Image: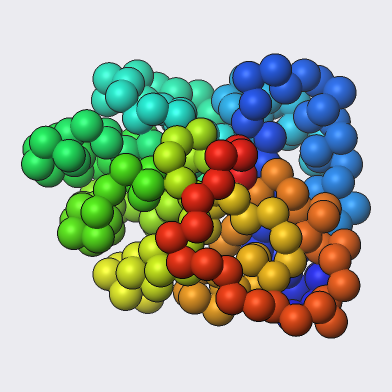
Amino acid sequence: MDQASLAAYIDHTLLKADANRSQIERLCQEAREHQFYSVCVNGIWVSTCQELLRGTDVKIAAVCGFPLGANATAAKAFEAARAAEDGAKEIDMVLQIGALLDGDYALVEQDIAAVVRMVEGKAIVKVIFETGMLNDEQKITACKLSEAAGAHYVKTSTGFGAGGATEADIKLMRANVSSSIGVKASGGVRDYATAVNMIKAGATRIGTSSGVQIVSADASTPTGSTAEGQQSSSQY
């Protein structure tokens, strides 16, 4: 896969608490230069990105209920609505992880559905599972609940929790949602080989803060297998 093709999969990400305007400006400049699919930022930066990316095809994604997922549903819905109003075309929300672990599936689905309804027609919704906290059965349940709630993507990780994206999880998630639902690999995807292997496993989007490094790599470098179950302590 050449760099231009790979760039079209990447959500170029900056979600650190200490992110400042100059870093956001650089993020958007890099997204313009490399033609990444989107930038992914905290909600406070959406309007800034809208200004900086005006006239380009680069979309803006905003996180919601990030990184814990434990916000009140109404708060998540408001946060998503405000981000969409400011120009976000995609919302990456964290599901109610504790409720999923408790088996309170109605709450998990209702939480996702509330966000989906709030931005319907304005933005798509990706649901972050935090796969490092879940077993396979719980991941499959999260896939089913996300699709039932009207989400458009399922996503592995925040990059702030335990573990990150693995090929095994991408294959599992891809197998347990309809073909119309996207699968996003995020958490520890920091090099060309890993990114390509995630796509081969079924990912339709890559979330990473290492987008420039990934697309600047030598595409002729062999794409060795990424260890399944590999964990990362670094954000994205």
Residue 115 spot, x, y in % from top left: 34, 36
Vertical side of 38 occupied by 229: above or below: below
Give the position of the N terminus as an image quadrant. Answer: bottom right
Count every numbered label the image shows and give the total: 0
Residue 147 visible somewhere in the drawing: no
**Quarter location, residue 137:** bottom left
- Which quadrant would residue 109 be assigned to in this image? top left
In the image, what residue occupies the spot 35% across and 30% down? 69
Front-most of residues 179 and 190? 190
Is 15 placed left or right of 143 in the picture? Answer: right
- Residue 147, picture quadrant: bottom left
Which coloring applies here? rainbow
Residue drawn at the location 44% of the way across and 23% of the way down: 79
Q: Is residue 216 left or right of residue 49?
A: right
Compared with residue 15, is residue 31 higher up or lower down, i.e. above or below?
A: below
Where in the figure is residue 207, as x and y percent of width and height? Answer: 60, 51
Question: Which residue is painted at 82% across and 28% down in the image?
Answer: 23
Q: Is residue 28 visible?
A: yes
Name the quadrant of the C terminus: top right
Residue 118 falls left or right of residue 176 = right
What residue appears at the point 31 percent right and 24 percent down from the top-left corner? 70
Position of residue 203 in the picture relative to residue 234 (left or right): left
Q: How far from the left and from the top, in percent, is residue 187?
A: 55, 48
Residue 38, x across and y down, in percent: 68, 50
